[in-house]
Image (cartoon, rainbow, N blue to C red):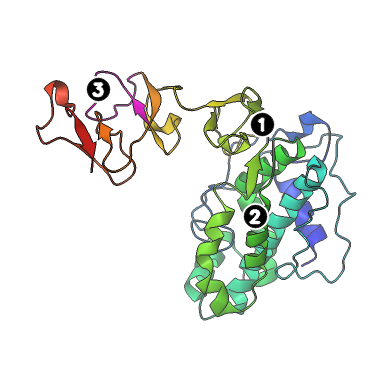
Amino acid sequence: MRRTSLLLSLALGSGLAACSSDADTKTDTGTGTADTGCNLFSGEGCEDSGTTDTGSTDTGTGGSDTDATDTGSTDTGATDTSSTDTGGATNPRAESQALLSFCADAIDSLCDHLYDCSAEFADKRLEFETSFGFTDAEGCKLALPPVFDGLCAPEVSAAAEGRVRRDTGRFDRCVAFAAVADCATYLANAPESDLCFSPLPVEGAIADGGFCARTSECASATSRCTVNDPTAFSAGGICEPALGAACVDASTCLPSQYCDQPGNDWEVTTGVPGVCAPRAAAGAACEDQAGCLGGLTCTSDTGPGQGGEPINGTCR
């Protein structure tokens, strides 16, 4: 499939004028979004990704940027690595177009493997055909772009506005994975696709105090966005350090932190005010059951104290 038409369907399906300077053209009013846990390369989680975006196509005057349209007539999608354009690393227009191309190539790669690797992907192909109503690779390439709008379009929009840029290390590895043609190699390297999603291979460009829509847009690895909506187009939040941030449950804090709720040390209880605090490593002192890194528990030889909190606990 020619990338030009696939990119166009991806851009129109998301209601996104990808490289317009008109901010109004980047707001999608549809309420249906694809599950962002869907993995373009492996297909994991895509069959139940929910309804596709039913919002009206954006008719803003900004229009899609045609300066970077691929005019190659022999582009086969899955084996094209031209999406690793490194010439405009600091150019929002180039970053946005590169992410559009990346999503298009990933979809091409998935569709090609569903049919080229007929034995290996027989069950997965049947699930996709039943869920999305296609019967061949070309039909797949037409049907899937809107499914991934919730994953791709917000990051493309953020790139166009300079809030994210490609994480070149992950991005190049993901493009290389999509270009693998051999079925056995593709299947053997499937874990590589985990580098490419949640979110796309991007890095944040927003300093603390700047406006953001999701945590991936924050430049500091220890910061988070006060509005962390993976499907949001507008930047209604602010990047701020997560340590010490107010919280009422663990979802507010970074994975390496927990919600420290004074007087409630035995377990995190939703709705109780606290602050984000760092989790401790194995052998470190702790006073909160939730205060240890993953897989560890704060325990004490003397047992829990009054109210259930461990006394002089250790992460074990």
Identify which amino acid the numbered label 3 is placed on.
Answer: Asn
Of mark 3 and mark 2, the one earlier in the sequence is 2
- Which residues are drawn in magenta? 258-272
Residue denoted by label 1: 206
| Image quadrant occupied by the C terminus | top left
The x and y percentages for residue 268 are 29, 29
Q: Residue at x 54, y 63 (%)?
A: 192
The x and y percentages for residue 235 are 66, 28
* Mark number, residue 169: 2
* Mark 2 residue crowding within 10 angstroms, few (<14) / some (14–19) / many (20+): few
Can you say whether 31 is above or below 311 in the image? below
Residue 54 visible in this rendered orientation of the protein: no
Can you say whether 199 is above or below 227 in the image? below
Which image quadrant for residue 267?
top left
Q: Residue at x 59, y 63 (%)?
A: 133
Q: Between residues 259 and 20, which one lies in front from this camera angle?
A: 259
Identify which amino acid the numbered label 2 is placed on.
Answer: Gly
Q: Between residues 178 and 304, which one lies in front from this camera angle?
A: 304
Of mark 3 and mark 1, the one earlier in the sequence is 1
Figure disc tally:
3
* Residue placed furthest toward the left: 302
Question: Would you say 16 lies left or right of 47 here?
Answer: right
| Image quadrant occupied by the N terminus | bottom right
Question: Would you say 28 lies left or right of 118 here?
Answer: right
